Image (cartoon, rainbow, N blue to C red):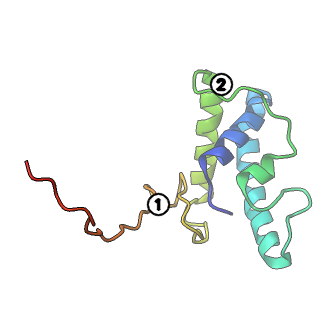
Amino acid sequence: MRPVVFTDVAFAARALLALPADLREERAARLVRQAAVADRYRRRFGKAHPAWGNGSLMGAAARLPRSPIESFGDPGFCACFAMVLQALVAHGYPATQRAPTGSGSCCLGGPSQPQFVSKPEVPSARPAKVA
């Protein structure tokens, strides 16, 4: 599966929120499995899976109806967001994730803070003011 970012989880949570409550947990697990299969497909054939997308969680949920609600002020959205995270952990994420490429950080499995490269200090060309 591709590295998971906040928008992947929020997108999948909106898809779960559009479903009846008794179907959500199973669908969350299925979305995670579909994203993993789609990523293997993408790496093998060099193109997105025809039904489940590019290997991202968002790609797996893209064809599903979604709730317009995307607010942590909504208890249903919060429950669905947590359900997606639980499905990722149950699937073994991030241990099953391949190493991220680029410098982007992931909400799960990637660097917890953005990686900054410090620049060497350059002396000022102006003389210091004398008080």
- Residue 109 is left or right of residue 18, and the answer is left
Circle 1 is placed at which residue position?
A: 111
The location of residue 94, given as percent across then percent down, is 55, 61
Q: Which element is circle 2 on? A: helix
Q: Residues within 10 Å of mark 1 (few under 14, many from 20)?
A: few
Is residue 101 placed above or below 54 in the rendered structure? below
- Which comes before the other along the chain, label 1 or label 2? 2
- Residue 53 is left or right of residue 115, and the answer is right
How many circles with numbers are drawn on the protein?
A: 2
The location of residue 131, given as percent across then percent down, is 7, 47
Q: Residues within 10 Å of mark 2 (few under 14, many from 20)?
A: some
What residue is rendered at 86% in x and 35% in y? 65
Q: Quadrant of the N terminus?
A: bottom right
Is residue 12 placed above or below 43 in the rendered structure? above
What residue is rendered at 57% in x and 71% in y? 99
The location of residue 54, given as percent across then percent down, is 79, 61
Q: Between residues 65 and 117, which one lies in front from this camera angle? A: 117
The location of residue 7, given as percent across then percent down, is 65, 45
What residue is rendered at 62% in x and 60% in y? 3
**In whole angstroms, how far apart are the C-alphas of marks 1 and 2?**
29 Å
What residue is rendered at 44% in x and 62% in y? 115
Circle 2 is placed at which residue position?
A: 76
| Mark number, residue 43 | none
Q: Which element is circle 1 on? A: loop
Report which quarter residue 78 is drawn in.
top right
